[in-house]
Amino acid sequence: MRIQCFGVAREIAGGSSITLDQVEGATVADLRQRLVATYPAFGELVSFAIARNEEYARDEEQIMAGDELVIIPPVAGG
């Protein structure tokens, strides 16, 4: 499954997207853990959100085939 990356998530992933197999059926929390295991720099972020089908996803939501996933890193402002 292809996961879009923005901001610092793009830098961590080394591109604008990540492709992971066997994501369907997992929860958003499972995906978050897998991202940190595969890309340890995600674990160094204060937080990062995952959007599913253009809405912020809760950790207990199940990922379905065809879902659009996006990693949204923390936003710095000033």
Image (spheres, rainbow, N blue to C red):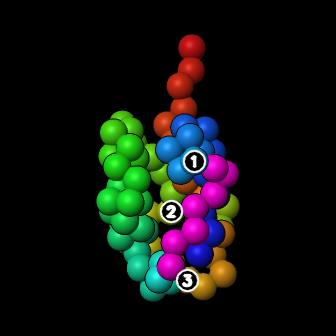
SS class of the residue under badge 2?
A: loop
Residue 64 disc label: 3
Q: Residue at x 41, y 79 (%)?
A: 26
Q: Badge 1: few (under 14), some or many (20 or more) residues near its Cα, within 10 Å?
A: few
Q: Measure the alpha-carbon separation of dots 2 and 3.
A: 12 Å
Dot placed on the residue nearer the N-terminal end, 2 or 3: 2
SS class of the residue under badge 3?
A: loop
Query: What's under tag 2, amino acid-wise?
Result: Ala
Write down the residue under mark 2. 57
Asked if residue 72 can be seen in this view, the reply is: no
Dot placed on the residue nearer the N-terminal end, 1 or 3: 1
Dot placed on the residue nearer the N-terminal end, 1 or 2: 1
Please say if the residues under marks 1 and 2 sit with CB atoms less than 8 Å apart.
no
Foreground pick, 20 / 4: 20
Query: What's under tag 3, amino acid-wise?
Result: Met
Range covered by the magenta-colored residues: 15-21
Quadrant in the rendering for residue 4: bottom right
Write down the residue under mark 1. 14
Give above or below for 62 relative to 50: below
Give above or below for 78 relative to 17: above
Q: Nearer the viewer, mark 2 or mark 3?
A: 3
Q: Residue at x 57, y 14 (%)?
A: 78
Q: Measure the alpha-carbon separation of dots 1 and 3.
A: 25 Å
Q: Badge 2: few (under 14), some or many (20 or more) residues near its Cα, within 10 Å?
A: some
Q: Measure the alpha-carbon separation of dots 1 and 2.
A: 23 Å
Q: Nearer the viewer, mark 1 or mark 2?
A: 1
Give above or below for 12 relative to 36: above
Q: Nearer the viewer, mark 1 or mark 3?
A: 1
